[in-house]
């Protein structure tokens, strides 16, 4: 019998990382600016930019740091208002607060994507920047969003923390806005424990971000080796003008990340196969619904989200307990205590908790289950059985036996 899999374990790090790490342990060369050139962090930046089709990449300590640096690099005035989706991880409003800006929340629909009508309504003259968070890899309508933001000259930061490998109309997510931010935290597609990277084609933005990330003195000369007069001009403009936040990545993390980049297509493919397999099984239950993706999106999921249909709050809680009793943890975003993805728990935002009835209703029925790419069909069946059986147990009236 197949047991419920441990969905929290990561895949082993490719063996190729070991030789590089052993060399570092010998030399102690862990700081990105010690070597005169080609430090592992610099090589990672070059490889990642190339893989994504971007001009520049800056590897740093986390995706949260990348979001913060992106806002700082846009040089927004204090108290600038930044529009973000109301369904995202607490790191997103946190980055806005760190950057001395004010988060403004817009509604998210039952399909976990930005409600374009509310987005358009909230994108008024008071908004200076937008962060689009592709939460759990779900891509909002980037054509509509870019058209609305372009018309108003509002820069878009893409929080693609969990979207490595996802494409929109054939374009890599993270390359559509002015800047794209990714995470290498352990629950993302590429795992270094911690780490992040930002990509952009904007030389001024990247120069500012490089300096603030901790490229003191002339260490920025070690970032990009190809001749680039735009970049030289941008660095000349910013030298000694910006504070340092020291959010650098260590060579050790880069050595763990680099050999995993080659694994991305396989993890993408297997993740999508696993997701679609379980989605079809869940959709066969009358009490479960996996929303359709948008047509232009091709996904790279490592988890599955689904909505409960026709369950009240007690039944919803009983369903989660019944799934747990079968060995499968289902998190309901709005019901678990102090959940970092429920906007009413972001009490660090100034002012009262905003009213977002549509997002709130979604969070009270939206379920989250991890589904790592390494799972095999028998394990996927255990998960799908547990979830569909739990729903049936709660929602099927007890049969009356006898007469
Ligand atoms: C994980 C995640 C983050 C934060 O990434 P860190 O690297 O842990 O800072 C931000 N946004 C989303 C959507 C995420 O999934």
Image (cartoon, grey):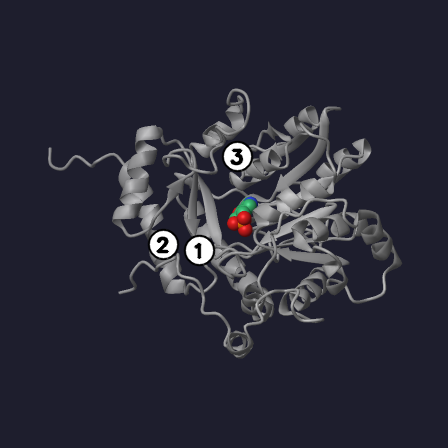
Residue 169 shows in the view: no
Q: Compared with residue 54, is residue 366 higher up or lower down, i.e. above or below?
A: above
Determine which residue is flagged by label 1.
Answer: 371
Residue 138 horizontal/vertical position (percent): 57, 45
Say which residue label 2 marks: 383
Q: Are marks 1 and 2 in contact (CB under 8 Å)?
A: yes
Give the CA distance from mark 3 to mark 1.
Answer: 21 Å
Name which of mark 1 and mark 2 comes first in the sequence: 1
Q: CA distance from mark 3 to mark 2?
A: 23 Å
Q: Earlier in the sequence, mark 3 or mark 2?
A: 3
Determine the residue positioned at 60% across, 47% down. 65
Within-10-Å neighbours for mark 2: few <14, some 14–19, many 20+: many
Q: Are marks 3 and 2 in contact (CB under 8 Å)?
A: no
**350 is higher (above) or lower (below) than 135:** above
Spatial separation of the CA atoms under disc 1 and disc 2: 9 Å
Which one is closest to the eye, mark 3 or mark 1? 1
Image position, residue 57 (x, y; %) = 70, 57
SS state under label 1: loop
Looking at this view, is 287 or 188 the one in front? 188
Image point (73%, 34%), residue name: 76
């Amino acid at each position: 019998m197949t047991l419920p899999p441990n969905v929290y374990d990561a895949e082993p790090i490719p063996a190729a990382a070991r030789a590089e790490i052993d060399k570092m342990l010998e030399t102690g060369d862990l700081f990105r600016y010690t070597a005169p050139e080609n430090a592992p962090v610099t090589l990672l930046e070059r490889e990642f930019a190339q893989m994504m089709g971007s001009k520049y990449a800056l590897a740093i300590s986390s995706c949260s740091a990348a979001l913060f640096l992106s806002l700082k690099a846009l040089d927004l005035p204090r108290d600038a208002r930044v529009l973000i989706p109301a369904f995202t991880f607490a790191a997103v409003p946190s980055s806005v607060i760190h950057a001395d800006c004010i988060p403004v929340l817009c509604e998210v629909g039952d399909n976990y994507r930005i409600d374009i009508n509310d987005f358009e309504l909230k994108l008024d003259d008071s908004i200076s920047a937008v962060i689009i968070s592709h939460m759990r890899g779900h891509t909002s309508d980037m054509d509509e969003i870019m058209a609305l933001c372009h018309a108003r000259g509002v820069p878009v930061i893409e929080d693609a923390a969990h979207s490595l490998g996802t494409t929109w109309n054939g374009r890599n997510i993270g390359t559509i806005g002015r800047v794209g931010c990714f995470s290498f935290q352990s629950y993302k597609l590429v795992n270094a424990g911690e780490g992040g990277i930002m990509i952009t084609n904007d030389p001024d933005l990247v120069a500012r971000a490089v300096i603030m990330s901790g490229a003191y003195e002339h260490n920025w000369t070690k970032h990009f080796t190809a001749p680039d007069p735009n970049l030289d001009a941008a660095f000349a403009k910013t030298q000694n003008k910006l504070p340092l936040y020291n959010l650098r990545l260590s060579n050790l993390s880069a050595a763990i990340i680099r050999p995993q980049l080659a694994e991305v297509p396989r993890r993408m493919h297997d993740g999508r196969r696993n997701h679609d397999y379980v989605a079809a099984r869940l959709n066969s239950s009358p009490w479960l619904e996996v929303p359709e993706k948008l047509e232009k999106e091709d996904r790279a999921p490592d988890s599955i989200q689904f909505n409960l249909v026709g369950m009240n709050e007690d039944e919803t809680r009983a369903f989660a307990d019944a799934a747990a009793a079968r060995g499968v943890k289902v998190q309901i975003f709005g019901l678990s205590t102090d959940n970092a993805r429920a906007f009413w728990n972001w009490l660090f935002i100034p002012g009262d908790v905003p009213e977002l009835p549509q997002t709130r209703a979604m969070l009270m029925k939206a379920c989250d289950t991890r589904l790592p790419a390494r799972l095999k069909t028998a394990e996927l069946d255990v998960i799908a059985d547990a979830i569909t059986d739990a729903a049936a147990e709660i929602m099927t009236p007890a049969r009356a036996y006898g007469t």
